[in-house]
Each structure stands twice: as structure tokens, then as C-alpha cells.
Amino acid sequence: MTFYAAIVVSALRNDQNKEIEMGVVGILTAGGDCPGLNAVIRGAVCRAVDLGFDVVGIKDGWEGLMNDHTMPLNREIVRGIFGKGGTILGTSRMDPYVHGDGLSTCKPTLSRHGIDRIIVVGGDGTLRSAMRLSNEGLGVIGVPKTIDNDIAGTDITFGFETAVQIATDAIDRLATTAEAHNRVIVVEVMGRTKGWIATHAGIAGGAHYILVPEFEYDIDQVVATLTERHDLGHRYSIVVVGEGISPPAGYEADANKTDAFGFERLGGVAYQVAAAIEDRTNFETRVSVLGHIQRGGTPVASDRVLATRLGVAAADFAAEGQTGIMVAVKGPDIVAVPIEVASEEIRSVPEELYATAKTFFG
Ligand code: F6P
């Protein structure tokens, strides 16, 4: 029997003996929100309650843990939330090591509620802080979350498929208006320093060029490809850019601000790319920065299922006393990996995938 199968069996056993007292598990969502957060919460709460836990919801990410903003969670409260965007717990970009002294700042809340294990749903910045709390002795079960799909140690993150679908729908719409007006439209998608959303949405939306942070580009090559396409009689072009690409030489903008985790706040590089294209081609060029629309609203079905599985598995691992771990996707399985893995170098778009996308440029 695999380790995970053993956990499931023990969960079933506990299900038949609901009087078993498991203690109190906390759950929080931190960092940028992501479609599927509510499905994780519902999955974790329902399974944890079945296993005999009391569950405390910690509001607004680490902020709630530092300042004792909490709410009780039970099956009734999480009923029907799986399809809603956002997070019923709220989130913030506060950090216990930036805005506090780590575990000692969180201890009063933990002891007041008797929380001995905590499920932390967050991206790489959040999981790094979770790892530090774990190293200080807190029982942590991490659940990776980001539309960027770039966290190390897991094959995919929930929210990504939804963001790709939203970006693809936007590209489909932008293509018809671009064609009507004989324009180039540069579509900027999120993803920070990785081009997963750009590559997937670009392939799915039939983009005529895709620029991602992982691979350098030559703006003259972009222009040559678009010119050739327009020379062939095509009236429009769609260029998809990941927000983390460098601007073309000579079009640099002011440095961006940083957030609480020290990450640069990205957005707007499409304007520099568009200016460089228009200057070199005289094609009328417009920009669409998709921004937070990619994170809002209801998750697609595959994200609802993935998020539910991760939430349920997190509660199972909590019951097994498996802490200092991150719940991860490995092929068809949900497994536990050491939480340190989330702090390793984030996952890049592989060359083969980008080569597939390139096949359709022009
Ligand atoms: O990491 C998720 C993400 O949506 C990135 O793609 C984006 O750069 C960033 O968060 C935006 O963060 P904020 O919501 O703080 O503007």
C-alpha cells in the first residue's frame, strides 16, 4: 500500500469514528488570490471535520495570525463556496517575518485557539515564511497556490487553468477587433518572471508571436515576422507578452515598486513592446493589459477538482501528523514533499514547450 493510500484508509477509519478528538487545525490563505482558494478551504474543512478536528479560519492571511482575526469553520459555513472566486477568509501580503518576529508574533493567536497544526495556502513567498515557522516548531501543511504555475515541487498549481482560459477568451475577442481595424494588439498576461500563462494562452488563442521572460527575444525578429504576415495579406496580428519580459532596448520604463515579499510589482511592459513595433512598422498598434481579471471569478472545472483534492489531502496529512510538508501534484497523484522544496528555484517554461508555440509564429 502506498503512503497516500494508507492515509486515505486511516481517514475512512476516522470517518466511522467521528468522536475521535484530533485537536484544532487552522487554515489561512495568503498572498495574491487565485481561483480555487474556496474549493481548497471547503475540501480541507469538510475532510478535517470528518476526521475529528475543530477548524479555525484565520482571516486575511498572516495578518489574522499575527493579530488574532479568526472565524470558526464548519461544513455549513463552507457549503457551496467551491465555485466562488476570491477567498472567504480574505488574504493579504503581510508577512510574519517582515511585519513581525516570526513565530513569537503568532503564538498568542495559536495558543488562544489551541491551534497545533496549520494549513497554509499560498505562493512561493508565503510558503517560504511557512517553512521558517515550521523550522521554529509550528506544524505546517503548505498548499501551493498561484495562477503563475511556477512553484517548485509540484507539476501544476490550481488557478493556472482558469487564468489561461480567461486569457484565451480575451485573445479570441481581441483578434476580431484587431482584424476589423487592421491593427496589431499586444496582449499582456500575468505570470511574473515565468511565461506559463503567456505560452499556454498564446498557443490556445493562436497568437502570432509570444514573448516570455525565460527566453530572450529580438524585437527586429518580431517585427520581421509581423511584417511578413501582413505582406501576405493578413490584416491583423496578436502578440502575447508575459508581464515579466524585459522591454525592448531604448524603451525602458521607470523601475517598478515592490510588494511586502520584496517582489517587483509588474505590469505595463506591453506598452513598450507596442511602441517599438509601431515605430518600426507603422502598423497601428494597441495594448491590452489583462491584469487582475485573470485572477477573478469562478474557477474552471479542472481547478475546482484539483483544489478540492489538495484541500482534502492537506487535512489527511494534518491527521497523520505529517507537518513541514507541502501538498503537491506528481502525475496523477497528490503527494507530500518537504516544504523546503517550495523555496527552490521556481519552475520555468521548458524549451520544448516554447518551441511548440514558435511553430505557429507569423
Ligand atoms: O503571483 C500571482 C500574480 O497574479 C502575478 O501574476 C502578478 O504579477 C501579481 O500576482 C500581482 O500581484 P498584486 O495582486 O499584488 O498586484
Image: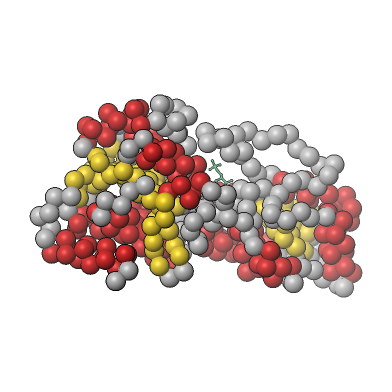
Residue under the point 44% across and 62% down: 329
Figure quadrant of residue 220:
bottom right
Residue under the point 21% across and 37% down: 114
Residue 318 coordinates in the image, percent (x, y)? 28, 52
In depth, the one of 137 and 152 nearer the eye is 137
Q: Is residue 98 left or right of residue 80?
A: right
- Looking at the image, can residue 190 be seen? no
Residue under the point 73% across and 56% down: 215
Residue under the point 63% across and 48% down: 193
Q: Quadrant of ligand 1?
A: top right
Figure quadrant of residue 70:
top left
In depth, the one of 168 and 325 nearer the eye is 325
- Looking at the image, can residue 211 be seen? yes
**What is the count of numbered marks?**
0
Q: Is residue 302 left or right of residue 2?
A: right
Q: Quadrant of the N terminus?
A: bottom left
Q: Is residue 185 left or right of residue 147?
A: right
Residue 185 coordinates in the image, percent (x, y)? 74, 57
Does residue 73 lie above or below 13 as drawn? above
Does residue 64 lie above or below 154 as drawn? above
Q: Is residue 331 left or right of residue 136?
A: right
Q: Quadrant of the C terminus?
A: bottom right
What colouring does the structure picture have? secondary structure
Residue 232 coordinates in the image, percent (x, y)? 87, 73
